[in-house]
Amino acid sequence: MICGGLPRRRFLRHSNAGIDYVVEAGDGAFYGPKIDIDVRDAIGRYWQLCTIQVDFQLPERFGLEYVDARGERMRPVMIHRALYGAIERFMGVLVEHFAGAFPTWLSPVQAVVIPIADRHLEYADEVAAASAARSLRVEVDRSDNTMGAKIRHQQLQKVPYMVVVGDTEVESKTVSIRRRSGEASHGTPLDDFVNGLAEEVAERRLELSL
């Protein structure tokens, strides 16, 4: 039984769960039936990523038993769950699906603070520290590159947000936010930025919302 289905197959629908599936006669394993979950990648290919398998053999071979509510010895049924399948295949499909531009909650680095000059580094560290206090993955770009080069580098890395700080931001305790798409906003209070980023991550939004 394959949840998610394959191309050109006739789907059935589970009446209780409301999930489309396909019955693959003869495709069960020797130890019992299984559910395969196939995921379509960015170019239309299907990959088996998850399996849930019912095993009637190993409990018998290991002599597993439990005592039920009536005090009788019973043989359990073992369920194997491979939630990701091969982790390399899962990560490959995930990277291809998002083309490397992960939603914020999945991004290894969720925002990079870019100080305009060295005198703004102290405030950049303050922004990063306030973010870290909310368990956000925020770094400071301390390179000697020009502003344009810094922004270009972070865009190529597909970091969701670039947070630019200069004299105006230091004085007003705000940040200027630049999305990886190039859209920018200015004068966002530091607390609003941190709270907004934490909320976006907590809700696991697929689109950038700041």
Image (spheres, rainbow, N blue to C red):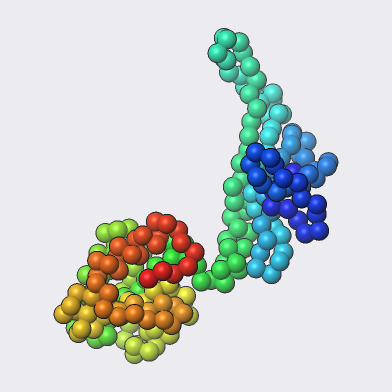
Q: Residue furthest left?
A: 171
- Does residue 142 appear in the picture of this structure? no
* Residue 171 in view of the camera: yes
Task: Residue lying at the far front in this picture: please name it.
Answer: 15
Residue 15 is left or right of residue 173, and the answer is right
Residue 162: quadrant of the picture? bottom left
Quarter of the N terminus within the rendering: top right
| Picture coordinates of residue 8, whole percent (x, y) | 81, 58
Q: Quadrant of the C terminus?
A: bottom left
Comparing 91 with 191, the one in front is 191
What percent of the width, then of the height, locates residue 114?
31, 79
Above or below residue 147? Residue 46 is: above
Residue 89 picture quarter: bottom right
Residue 196: percent from left, percent from top: 33, 64
Residue 145 in percent (x, y) is at 35, 88
Q: Is residue 68 left or right of residue 196?
A: right
Q: Nearer the viewer, residue 2 or 28?
A: 2
Check the image and report above or below for 163 versus 45. Answer: below
Q: Residue at x 26, y 59 (%)?
A: 133
Residue at screen point 69% across, 58% down: 47
Task: Report how many numbered discs are placed on residues in the image.
Answer: 0
Front-lying residue, 199 or 96: 199
Work out whether residue 27 or residue 175 is closer to the camera in this orientation and state it: 175
Q: Is residue 127 above or below residue 185?
A: above
Q: Is residue 51 left or right of residue 67?
A: right
> Residue at image x 39%, y 84%?
151
In this view, the residue farthest toward the right is: 26
Q: Residue at x 65, y 27 (%)?
A: 77
